[in-house]
Amino acid sequence: MNGSRAAWWGLAVIGVAVLLSPLVFPNPYQIRLGSLLLAYALLAVALDLVVGRTGQISLGHAAFFAIGAYGEGMLQAEYHVAPWAALALAVVMSAVCGVVVAGLAQRVRGPYLAMLTIGVGIAVQNAIYVAQPFTQGAMGLAGIGGLPLPFAAPGPVTTYYVGAVALLLALAGGIALSSTRIGTAMAVLRQRETLARAAGIDVRRVKIAAFTASAALAAAAGAFYGTTLGFISPESFSMKLSIFALVSCVLGGLGTPFGPLLGTALLYGFQQIAARTAQGDVLMFGVLLIVVPLLLSRGLAGVFVSLSARIVAALGLQAPRAQATLAAAARPGDKATAVLWLPRRDGERFHLREISHAFGALRALSGVSLEVAPGEVVGIVGPNGAGKTTLLNIASGYYRPSSGMVLLGVTDLTRVPMHERARMGVVPTFQHPQLMDASTVLANVEAGLLADPRAASAKVGRLRLDDVAADLGLTPLLGMLAGDLPYGPRKIVEVARALVSEPAVLLLDEPTSGIAPADVEMVANAIRIARERGVAVVLADHRVEFVTQVCDRVVVLVGGAQLAAGRPAEVTANPAVVEAYLGRPSQGNYA
């Protein structure tokens, strides 16, 4: 059973349990506790959309919960707006605030992002106190009515079922999202932001969209919370609530379909028990904040996955171990043309013109020019610090040059960001492989499909992926976690990710560094395939013998400047190159 089908079956089981709960626990007090649990679970699901799916840190989601609660409450109690209309307006208000906060959040990272969201939470809570004429301040806001249904009047049971349906819809949306291109993009972004950009993902747009949707869902949870109690006060929306939601996500399992719900249910249950003693709930939080990172770093969902993997291994069904080399797994024969190969920008040359770049006072590149035709392989060699990686980073859009131009045909890419270049066909690999270690090899290679809008069809994408995997000997390893692979196969996986996007220009940064000779042959095979498909290949590598045997032309950089360029035999025989870099004429083969 695949993961998506299992998730839908899991949702069906949870749905039955949630919908039957009022029949098992009919006491009004128990129903109200259940409704509060649903509100907190919905908040955790909203937060997981930011933390678990896109890797952003938020410690201020109580602010959006409060906006929903007070938006619903004030519109009902003060302006006599109908409950459902008030909820819709509160959600819109929170979404607008989410866009603003998300836009600001793109300017900071790590602990500074956490500080920003803490500040938002504190500001909103204190704004409730200050805006007493509208919110009633510390006195609290009363008179909030329930959410009616066409066939049922407001009441505890009706309110419960409204929350239950909202939560089940949110969970269903999360499962469905995982199977879409945007869901795949989020999964890539959460693990490797650089990989996401190289795969054509607009990181800023995805993060803002996720934060906005999360803020809207958190507001819906807050509005439901307010209608459940009929009364709200500002102390209910402190930073403690944000921590509660975050711990729920981590405890259940970040980024998992049911982790936020599972974590919330356990945490809320513990809280109800611990609250019977003075400061018991605070003590419980402290203990969990210590225990969860140490013993449950992958959450309860991760524990379940680990146990499942052990059972599979005990039954002898585990995926094969990575081979020391991939050469034996490669498809026999010389297969030059992939299934459904459609060149992206046929016949266009890739140009780097008079590229100069400086890091502060350090001049990394000075007036370097390079041109690559479709189906041509150009190698870049030079000593450490010569500027090879910097030049490729400028070609990919990772850096913007201090001066000079980057062109694809007549299209100026100089100011085009990395993700847009990838979608136009300029696709890089990296000196240190940028892989999603917690995902399978299959998922890592599939990430390359995001860079090609024409691969929206699952059938087309899978045919292309199978073809590239077979060419590079990865087929036996597709089910393995990328983090379990040796260094050589990791390099091959990254090259496969780039090839599956069907690039117009392939940028390879040190693809043979640190790998076995047999895996070097697989890199050479990948380059041959790219050349025969009409891809312009730019290769930077330290193995001179390898570069001279697979490249049509070679450029030598020394000290950030171009020392020589030409056919491999001409360059390696150049006295200036021999003196500055080679030390002696190149002989032998790269193996």
Image (cartoon, rainbow, N blue to C red):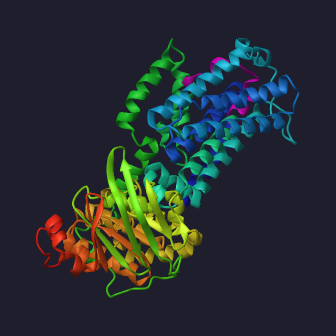
> Does 433 appear above or below 87?
below
Q: Residue at left 73%, top 38%? A: 91
Q: Residue furthest bottom?
A: 333
- Front residue (pair 294, 136): 136
Image vertical order of residue 136 relative to residue 452, above or below: above
Measuring 52% from the left and 56% from the top, which residue is drawn there? 417
Q: Look at the image and tell me whether residue 507 can be seen.
A: yes
- Is the stretch drawn in magenta largely helix, strand or loop? helix
Residue 240 x %, y %:
55, 23
Residue at image position (78%, 26%) is 73
Residue 225 placement: quadrant = top right
Give the residue at the far left of this rendering: 584
Q: Tell me if 504 is positioned left or right of 478 in this view.
A: right
In the displayed structure, 46 sits above or below 35; it is below
Q: Residue 398 location, x and y as percent?
A: 44, 55
* Camera sees residue 472: no
Image quarter in which the C terminus is found: bottom left
Q: Image check: 7 left or right of 562?
A: right
- Using the rendered view, name the quadrant where residue 432 is placed: bottom left
Q: Which residues are magenta?
A: 220-240
- In the image, residue 108 lies at what x, y percent? 50, 37
Q: Nearer the viewer, residue 572 or 562?
A: 562
> Left or right of 341: which side holds 575?
left
Query: Is residue 550 shown left or right of residue 441?
Result: left
How many labels, in total? 0
Q: Nearer the viewer, residue 355 or 582?
A: 355
Say if 390 sits above or below 113 in the image: below
Q: Position of residue 338 (x, y in %)?
A: 45, 82
Query: Does residue 522 belong to the magenta stretch?
Result: no
